[in-house]
């Protein structure tokens, strides 16, 4: 299902990104990178700009300055279908699915830009293997799924494009603790298969634990970055872990 991994080094590199919505500037010089086959987490308070980073990559936010490179190619401002062709998939916040369509039809929409029917079937089989509940319920309407199953469907639809980079915006939001753990396990499994993941996550502790690298954003800027050791940083402990 996966495309060949990018060469060593950065898969995604964002440099000095200034972006927002119209005259409202949210990001004020964000720089970060995602390497092939790793999880990178974006954490921070509401309004810090976490989701705007992803939306800038996916050409939903307005980029005023800076660059977004994928495998050394400038992808700043590319349209959705072009980003999909480059290997970038996006699961937005809210577990958005086509509620009146069947589970299978939702997944097939995710492969709309793939011409080869054999590739579509191969990717569909791969998604069903990963998410057996979706195979079991493939012919029923998506609105009948639970919240966790809808999140699986949203992720499965994004995987139909065999992405190099999968971007997830608050995948655990609104899920029970048990379902959150299940989703995080799925995300780790995707990383282990070689898919690079950029995740915005409100559960800061869990995000840091599963990530290879984490960036803390505040007021549109990166104020801290590092591996799991940043759990010991007092800023993280005070704001996100209740001082523990």
Image (tube, helix red, strand yellow):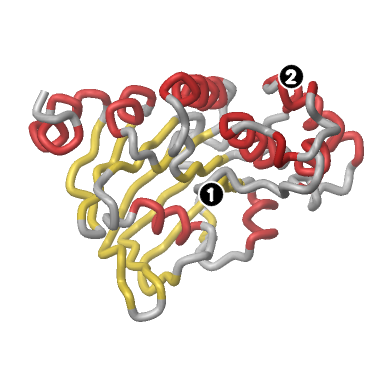
Furthest residue toward front: 144
Quadrant (top left, top right, bottom left, bottom right) of the N terminus: top right
| 156 lies left or right of 191 | right
Which residue is at a point 27% across and 55% down the rendered structure image?
48
Residue 94 lies, in percent from the top left, at: 52, 47
Residue 71 lies, in percent from the top left, at: 53, 47
Comparing 227 with 24, the one in front is: 24
Residue 83 lies, in percent from the top left, at: 62, 55
Q: Is residue 16 above or below residue 107?
A: below
Q: Which residue is mark 1?
A: 92
Can I make out residue 3 in this image? no
Q: Helix, strand, or loop for circle 2?
A: helix
- Quarter of the image for residue 28 reads bottom left
Comparing 192 with 136, the one in front is: 136
Q: Which residue is mark 2?
A: 129
Can I make out residue 102 in this image? yes
């Amino acid at each position: 299902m996966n495309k060949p991994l990018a060469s060593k080094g950065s898969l995604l590199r964002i440099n000095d990104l200034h972006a927002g919505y119209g005259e409202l500037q949210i990001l004020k010089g964000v720089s970060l990178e995602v390497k092939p086959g790793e999880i990178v987490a974006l954490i921070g308070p509401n309004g810090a700009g976490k989701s705007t980073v992803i939306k800038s990559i996916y050409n939903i936010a307005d980029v005023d300055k800076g660059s977004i490179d994928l495998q050394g190619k400038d992808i700043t401002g590319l349209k959705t279908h072009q980003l999909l062709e480059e290997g970038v998939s996006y699961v937005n916040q809210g577990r958005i699915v086509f509620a009146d369509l069947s589970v299978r039809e939702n997944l097939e929409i995710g492969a709309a830009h793939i011409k080869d029917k054999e590739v579509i079937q191969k990717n569909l089989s791969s998604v069903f293997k990963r998410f057996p509940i979706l195979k079991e319920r493939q012919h029923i309407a998506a609105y009948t799924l639970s919240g966790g199953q809808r999140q699986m469907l949203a992720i499965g639809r994004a995987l139909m494009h065999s992405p190099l980079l999968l971007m997830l915006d608050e995948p655990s939001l609104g899920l029970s603790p048990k379902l959150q753990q299940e989703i995080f396990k799925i995300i780790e499994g995707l990383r282990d298969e070689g898919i690079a993941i950029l995740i915005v996550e409100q559960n800061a502790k869990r995000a840091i634990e599963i990530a290879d690298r984490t960036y803390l954003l505040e007021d549109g800027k990166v104020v801290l970055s590092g591996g799991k050791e940043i759990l010991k940083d007092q800023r993280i402990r005070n704001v996100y872990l209740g001082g523990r």
